[in-house]
Amino acid sequence: MQTNDFHWPGGQKCAVSLTYDDGLPVHYEYVGPLLYEAGLRGTFNIPISYDPLSHPEKWRALANDGHELGNHSLFHPCRRTPDNTWLEEYYDLCDYTPERFRSELEIANLVLYLLDGKHERTYGNTCCDTTIGRGDREISMDDILKKLFIAARGPFNRQIADPRAPINLMQVGHFGADSQDMTYEDIQAEIKRAVEMGGWIVFMIHGVGKETHPLYIDKGAHERLVAWLAANIDIWTAPFIEVAKYVKGFQEG
């Protein structure tokens, strides 16, 4: 199919995916119900070794409301840098082999299947990292991810994905809506830019409200965002996997 023939379903002007990371209680206690009441669905990227170990039934209920449970790994490994020394050395992606990385993702997928019964999955890159290994052994995750996922959120690049051009679905790219220097007006402006170009904009969010996570979006700003998206029916607000499958179908058609 020619890329210039692309159109979003129902004549909508762009796609927005709200993705929430780290499996926080505020996600099932507040965010999921808020989205559901507004007629919207989100993506919740959960590390299996976090809250799901204590409250699997909460995540199952969230999935039953139509939200996506995304793979955020077993243990939330990242590339250890001077900026994230909180990370235990054992979970440093610089020291991961392809075999270890793949096996941990496969186990996480199995646990998620036991929660929501779904076989298709997307990956929310932990710490936005897209490689494993170090030095001359550093490699892209893409080949591993392609065998396990429909798509991966990929790098924090503040770029809107253009479906009229080839999209690497293993590195879609995204914005950080919980950045303390990004206001509601800034988020709204980026979505309007996505409308103008007919693109797909993905937001990463951790906490919602102060003290829910070191990275958080103001609760009031989040409520305004959800209400605005719900009111603008020409914007397709959908889980990451739904938009990815639509784009994938178009690219392969």
Image (cartoon, grey):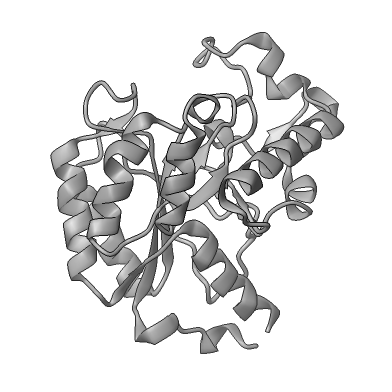
Picture coordinates of residue 245, whole percent (x, y) = 59, 69
Picture coordinates of residue 205, whole percent (x, y) = 37, 40
Q: Is residue 158 left or right of residue 115?
A: left
Q: Is residue 163 left or right of residue 204?
A: right
Residue name at image x 22 percent, y 31 percent? 209
**Residue 11 visible:** yes
Query: Of residues 117 and 221, which is closer to you in this image?
Result: 117
Residue name at image x 47 percent, y 51 percent? 63
**Residue 157 visible:** no
Picture coordinates of residue 105, whole percent (x, y) = 71, 38
Image height of 166 relative to 69, above or below: below
Image height of 105 relative to 74, above or below: below
Picture coordinates of residue 61, whole percent (x, y) = 43, 47
Farthest residue to the front: give it.
Answer: 57
Quadrant position of residue 8: bottom left
Image height of 219 relative to 196, above or below: above
Q: Quadrant of the image for the C terminus?
A: bottom right
Q: Quadrant of the image for the N terminus?
A: bottom right
